[in-house]
């Protein structure tokens, strides 16, 4: 049997644009290389949506410009998650990117011209400031020099008790030698506290160093931060707090790849003990939300658009193009995956790899299994495990369900607005309504969505037959290809 290892898809990031990022990538590159600084851009998307690949493509395009005034640095937060001070590792990584290099290797200081030596010394001072310590001493616990106490040992408890009560004058009445006071004393305890140079001083020194290294207003340092959402909440917040050091430093751009909802929950969990309070009804609430916190840091959020069904089919076909013809999915099987998969690139690769594995096992056992049926099995097994469990107990379950769906297909109105509830036979009291649709919360809770209602109810391109559908091509907002998505 031929070796089929090449048929399996890697889950690693790639700079091959299978997801048509090229439709909005130029706009993002233009943003991070020309917009006024300081600037923080958020690339928001769920797990497996392609954030790392997009960030890598953006960095590659910036580097390929070959402009000395554009410096880039990459920081994978998750790799430093166990670092005792993730914030320090992040700032050191940023500083390290500014050192003079040749062919990617730092040039020794003694080989640099005098002007660059001064710049390097400036960066060294900034790095050392992250480790500066403050030492102080204070009085610790009571201690006794037991070796010198000798026979006075038995009188010590009474002396200590009286001393603590302010009655040291009675020490003589106990026959305690005056020298015993030298044997009983408070220990001096030394402490060390790590201290970062004041924020203002750090910002000023870093700004000077950056200006010297990247030139005038066109120069900038672009920092790509990936995998924040894979860190523990307190670690992710550390990086966000460190970024605050640079929020007012000109010529700095930060591009953050993250799952926004995960980070928001982490922020709220991190600060919940500090900001929670009780309202009049005794319920606890968090006045400062994770979303508000992120808005103070991220000026331009960009939400990676989800894959539509037609995008999924094209994506699967693109992933298969380098495979031997015998390993490629037929059109029907590809359609099963495109219609049944959750719209997530990593989920797509995962399902295709499972399908490939089961298909190979079936070949080795000489089992004749329909490829579309095997695809449906993979989808049910991975995405609806409870249904798969019941299917194993009742072999006709899925066939019965398939027949029922064919007899009573879902209507688009039911999916959006919910199922219509008819009035009772006697016609008393109940008004016909729809319940359970995707739009139910927006239709039933008008007070919460009043701004949304006002915005949509006015004259717009969404009204009177001009329905512009969201598309991945233009960043999840308006579809550039009106011929396919504008419905008349």
Image: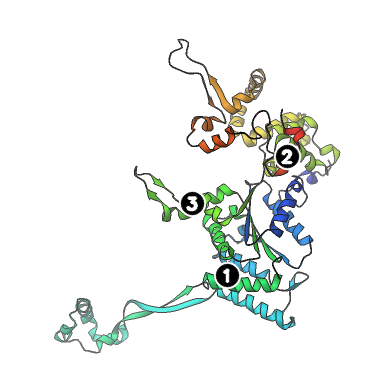
Q: In the image, what residue occupies the spot 58% across and 49% down?
A: 260
Badge 3: residue crowd in 10 Å (few <14, some 14–19, many ≥20): many
Q: Residue at x 15, y 83 (%)?
A: 170
User: Is residue 452 shown above or below 71?
Assistant: above
Per the model, the C-alpha gap separating discs 1 and 2 is 49 Å
Q: Is residue 318 left or right of residue 275?
A: right
In the displayed structure, would residue 342 be above or below residue 135?
above
Which of the 4 image quarters holds residue 190? Answer: bottom left
The residue labelled by disc 3 is: 268
Reading the chain from its start, which is encountered first: label 1 or label 3? 1
Q: Which residue is the site of mark 2? A: 352
At numbered mark 3, what does the secondary structure look like: helix, strand or loop?
helix
Looking at the rendered image, the quarter that the C terminus falls into is: top right
Q: CA distance from mark 1 to mark 3?
A: 27 Å
Viewer-proximal residue among 259 and 190: 259
Residue 146, percent from left and from top: 30, 83
- Going 47% across and 35% down the picture, which residue do you hit? 447
């Amino acid at each position: 049997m031929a070796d089929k290892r090449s048929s399996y898809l890697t889950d690693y990031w790639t700079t091959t644009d299978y997801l048509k990022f090229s439709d909005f990538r130029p706009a993002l590159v233009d943003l991070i290389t020309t917009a006024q600084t300081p600037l923080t851009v958020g690339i928001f998307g769920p797990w497996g949506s392609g954030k790392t690949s997009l960030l890598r493509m953006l960095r590659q395009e910036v580097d390929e410009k070959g402009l000395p005034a554009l410096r880039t640095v990459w920081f994978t937060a998750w790799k430093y998650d166990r670092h005792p001070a993730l914030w320090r590792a992040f700032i050191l990584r940023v500083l390290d990117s500014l050192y003079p290099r040749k062919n990617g290797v730092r040039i020794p200081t003694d080989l640099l011209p005098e002007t660059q030596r001064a710049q390097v010394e400036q960066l060294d001072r900034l790095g050392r400031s992250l480790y500066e310590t403050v030492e102080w001493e204070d009085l610790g616990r009571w201690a006794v020099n037991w070796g010198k106490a000798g026979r006075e040992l038995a009188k010590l408890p009474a002396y200590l008790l009286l001393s603590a009560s302010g009655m040291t004058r009675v020490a003589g009445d106990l026959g305690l030698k005056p020298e015993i006071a030298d044997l009983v004393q408070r220990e001096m305890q030394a402490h060390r506290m790590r201290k970062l140079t004041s924020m203002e001083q750090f910002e000023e020194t870093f700004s000077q160093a950056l200006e010297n290294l990247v030139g005038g207003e066109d120069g900038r340092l672009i920092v790509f931060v990936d995998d924040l959402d894979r860190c523990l909440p307190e670690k992710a917040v550390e990086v966000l707090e460190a970024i605050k050091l640079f929020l007012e430093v000109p010529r700095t751009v930060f591009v953050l790849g993250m799952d926004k909802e995960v980070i928001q929950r982490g922020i709220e969990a991190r600060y919940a003990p500090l900001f929670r309070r009780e309202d009049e009804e005794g319920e606890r609430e968090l006045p400062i939300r994770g979303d508000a916190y992120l808005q103070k840091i991220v000026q331009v959020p960009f939400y990676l658009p989800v894959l539509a069904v037609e995008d999924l089919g094209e994506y699967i076909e693109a992933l298969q193009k380098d495979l031997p013809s015998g390993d490629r999915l037929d059109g029907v099987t590809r359609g099963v995956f495109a219609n049944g998969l959750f719209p997530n690139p990593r989920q797509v690769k995962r399902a295709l790899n499972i399908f490939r594995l089961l298909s190979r096992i079936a070949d080795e056992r000489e089992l004749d299994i329909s490829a579309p049926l095997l695809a449906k099995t993979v989808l049910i097994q991975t995405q609806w495990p409870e249904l798969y469990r019941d299917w194993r107990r009742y072999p006709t379950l899925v066939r019965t369900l398939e027949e029922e769906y064919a007899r009573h297909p879902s209507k688009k109105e039911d999916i959006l607005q919910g199922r219509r509830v008819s009035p009772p036979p006697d016609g008393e009291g109940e008004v016909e309504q729809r319940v359970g649709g995707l739009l139910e919360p927006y239709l039933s809770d008008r007070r919460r969505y009043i701004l949304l209602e006002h915005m949509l109810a006015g004259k717009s391109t969404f009204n009177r037959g001009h329905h512009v559908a969201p598309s991945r091509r233009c960043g999840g907002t308006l579809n550039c290809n009106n011929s396919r998505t504008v419905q008349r």
